[in-house]
Amino acid sequence: MGAVLASENLWRAWSFQPLVLGAAVVAIGFFLHGWLRLHRRRADLAPWTRIPLFVGGVTVTVLAIVSPIDTIGESYLQSVHMLQHVLIADLGLMLTILAVRGPLTVFFLPRDLLVPLARVGWLRRLLRFLLRPGISYAVWVVVLVSWHVPRFYEAALHHRFWHDLMHASFVLGGLLVWTQIIDPSRHHRLTLNERIGYTALVFWTGQIMAYVILFDFRPLFSTYVDQPVRLLGLSPLTDQKLAGVVMMVEQVATVGVAFVLLLLASRRERDRTAVAAAQQPVT
Amino acid sequence: MPSPWSFTFEPLFVLLGAGALVAYARAWRREGAGAGRAAAFCGGVLLIVAALNSPLETIAAEYLVLFHLLQNVIISDWAPPLLIIGLTPAMRSAIAAHGGRPFERVTRPTVALPVWLVGWYVVHLGGVYDTALSNPWLLNVEHLFMIAIGLVFWWPVLADEPRSVPTLGRIAYIFAAFVLSAFLGLALTFAPPLYGYYDSLPERLWGISAAKDQNLGGILMTSEQAAVFFAAIVWLLVRLFREEDEAERVLQEQQRARGIF
């Protein structure tokens, strides 16, 4: 899809993507507006720490799309393409969802936009359907697996439409499972312990996917095999194995950390429940 | 070189297996443990004895590191949990009492996990592995060591004696073990042949090169551990949900007794 560049010029291969940059600016604008509204009412529900989380999440996502990561990932190295995917679909999303958790979820969209959107029946029904835990997981798995089928992956590497669709579907899948794991709006579709189980399922599914890429004895994607410029001297197979490692390590750093934090939260809740039960007055 | 299908005979493990079964049968008769527990214990013993007295041992010791790694996961990851599940709480208490303070210390999660990890990594170092393979008795010591660290590792997960680790702690323990042990499988998959013993063999069984043999071993180890640890986490989560339900029930009973409902 992208023109072949001399390897020494690759670090300058930044792309100007108005749609991505515009969406990022709008998202940060919405967030700051919502944060300010809530901060004025209840500062404890909109602490300052949420701003770097949200801006960090958006920045990670934007950088993954407009920086040389995009060019290198599309044409040169599968491992860098994998890095792009995990930044977009895991790290960036995780940070932004963490930033808006709690009442900020409701304050994120301006009232004038939220109210008409909330009245759109089909949108509510669609969201309700997609946010069933089993459906969220199924969508995420289907997206993850189907885009790694060589035929589809190659199509995405060679056609801008399919590539954008690939990234959009990764964002959708990631958004759905991270919403279940973090539960930003405190819907309690899953109990805390069920979220631990859900996170374990997501983690192990991701690991199995990484194994498929990591342990294959042949390079799966011809674009990277046919690329004559071997950046960092990586052979196509080593590059592919590295892509598997990137996925594994990133999963540990995001889903793995979420798993541990949920375990700690569950322990705290147990302790609180035990103390509360002991302190109940006898009537 | 012997035929890959020839059986081996390791009297040490046959005797140890027989001794364990006799001791278990006596305790089983005394306590009347269920058939399920007996089957689990016998299965554990059978796995160890069969893995070390069969063509698996021949191929592991004479041809392919892949089979040696399979043997290691059988005796260290599959058999020990079955052996512990097969013991009744009274049997476990008796073992813990006999083991005294050293047993109490080594089965603490903060000790058992590092012991298992260090043991798991050290045994698979090129020099250690090659040395063990060069002498049948050293190989037996290696296998005994693998069984021992497997038992030490799985004890805090499956047993409540000498202490009962909270379920959340057990889940964290298994998760940490999975993450921290993954590097060995990755190293075996990525690294050039580490084991001179297998690399220098004159005959390549089934045409598997030394590099591919080791890569397949890494894949086997990583996939096997992912499956075993995931199964353990699922079991622990089910236990956690049951505990949650039980706590809820007890709380409601207490509230009813106090007249809150």
Image: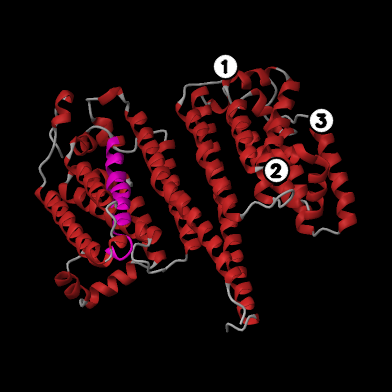
Residue that carries the numbered disc 2 in the rendered image: B80
Percent of width and height locating residue B195 = 56, 20
- Spatial CA span between label 3 and label 1: 27 Å
Q: Position of residue B80 (x, y in %)?
A: 70, 43
> Which residue corresponds to the image point at 65% horizontal and 49% vertical from the top-left?
B157
Q: CA distance from mark 1 to mark 2?
A: 30 Å
Residue A50, horizontal then vertical, whole percent: 28, 53
Specify start and end residues of the magenta stretch as a single range: A80-104
Whether labels 3 and 1 share one chain? yes
Say which chain tag 3 marks: B
Between residues A261 and B184, which one lies in front from this camera angle? A261
Q: Chain of mark 2?
A: B
Residue at image location 15% in from the left, 40% down from the top: A1
Amino acid carrying label 1: it is Gly
The subunit carrying tag 1 is: B
**Mark 3 residue type:** Leu
The image's mark for residue B83 is none
Expressed as whole percent of the image width and height from the top left, the position of residue B82 reads: 71, 48
Magenta span contains residue B217: no
Seen from the viewer's position, the closer of residues A84 and A21 is: A21
The answer to whether the residues at label 1 and label 2 have Cβ atoms under 8 Å apart is no
Secondary structure type for disc 1:
helix
Disc 2 residue crowd, few under 14, some 14–19, many 20+, Cα 10 Å = many
Q: Residues within 10 Å of mark 1 (few under 14, many from 20)?
A: few
Q: Which residue is denoted by mark 1 in the rendering?
A: B196
- Label 3 sits on residue: B12
Residue located 66% across and 44% down the image = B154
Magenta-drawn stretch contains A97: yes
Give the dominant element type of the magenta stretch: helix, strand or loop.
helix
- Upstream in the sequence, badge 3 or badge 1? 3
Relative to B119, B18 lies left or right: right
